[in-house]
Amino acid sequence: MQKIGPEIDVFSTSPQSIAVDRESYLESVISVARWSEECGCKGILVYTDNGLVDPWLVAQVILQHTSSLCPLVAVQPAYMHPYAVAKMVSSFAHFYQRRLFLNLVAGGFTNDLIALNDTTPHDKRYSRLVEYTTIIKELLRSPNPVTFHGEFFTVDKLKMTPPLPGELMPGILVSGSSDAGLAAARALGATAIMYPKPAKEYEDGGLRVASDAGVRVGIVARSSEDEAWAVAHERFPEDRKGQIAHKLAMKVSDSSWHKQLSDLADEALSEKTPYWLFPFQNYKTFCPYLVGSYETVARELARYMAVGCRTFILDIPPNREELEHISTVFAQAQKQAVQLD
């Protein structure tokens, strides 16, 4: 994947353990990581969830089998103390001299949170996330012991060993499309990751985009529209069980992005557009897809870039060939984005 100018970063996503046979899971992680690095991705997202294997162990596998790819590790405050996160980052830097990214998530499925006895309200979880991440950042960048007294976390003269080299400070991303999520990203100076609406809705000031923003989006692109849509429908056929699972998930989620995408789904079906939510409706993925010819999808990506999106997190690639098609799209999007600026 070609670099989209000096300010654009592209991440792929690692397979989920719940979706791959145990016997082949590690090999699947290694393969996707290697494809991603070969195609020029900056890094690779590793999910965290009550039903998945530990993301830090997956990140270590990725580091061991690539040379420059940056794991983007999803971090949920309910799972571990901020000191433990900082210790993981500094330890990986000590072992591999590699940089990590952190994808801070507040947690959206209420059943998962209840199982952890975490009853913190939605917006308060983002306030907690700010404290949590502030402690992590201070521990990693300060040569002196860190003291912090907050509503949710307190540390007193806490020092990080081994120290982290300054050039290996992790990039910080915050997932969340709600006002609380965007406010948390601003407070932390982090990249706000959204599950986007169609690009047209962000143009002409219709919807605001954070000054340092990113989007989570899948892509299916081919040389012709018909071929792209044929591939998309073959990969994501209608699934009645998936549709039921989606509706059930809606009932146990308080995430604003989940509700926003669900509301958009019927509207998107009525328009001829590359923006496609069918996989989301069938519970096959949690992000919208862009489908069409290279030119069509590149144009949509360029419109996101033109309104300020600087980070793109792709869905899990099914094979290396798919990343090569996406590389072609981003190369074209770079040229179109320059024309739109």
Image (tube, rainbow, N blue to C red):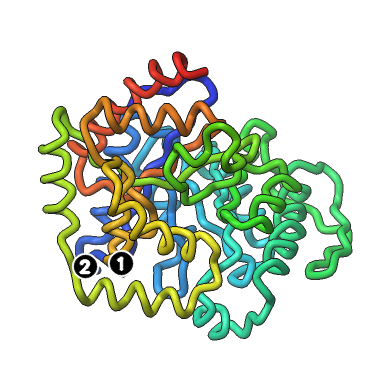
Label 1 CA crowd tier, 10 Å (few <14, some 14–19, many 20+): many
Residue 99 relative to residue 276: left or right: right
Q: How many marks?
A: 2
Question: Which mark is first along the chain, 2 or 1?
Answer: 2
Residue 210 lies in what quarter of the image?
top right
Q: Between residue 81 and residue 14, name the one nearer to us.
A: 14
Q: Position of residue 80 (x, y in %)?
A: 62, 68
Which tag is nearer the camera, tag 1 or tag 2? Answer: 1
Q: Residue at x 47, y 64 (%)?
A: 258
Give the residue number, with chain letter if any, for mark 1: 283
Q: Residue at x 56, y 32 (%)?
A: 204
Which amino acid type corresponds to the residue marked 1 in the rendered image?
Tyr
Which amino acid type corresponds to the residue marked 2 in the rendered image?
Asp
Give the residue number, with chain letter if any, for mark 2: 21
Q: Position of residue 289 (x, y in %)?
A: 32, 47
Q: Is residue 29 visible?
A: no
Residue 301 relative to residue 124: left or right: left
Residue 1 relative to residue 257: left or right: left
Label 1 secondary element: loop
| Cα distance between the residues tagged 1 and 2 | 19 Å
Residue 34 lies in what quarter of the image?
top left
In the rendered view of the protein, which quadrant contains the N terminus? top left
Label 2 secondary element: loop
Q: Residue at x 65, y 62 (%)?
A: 84
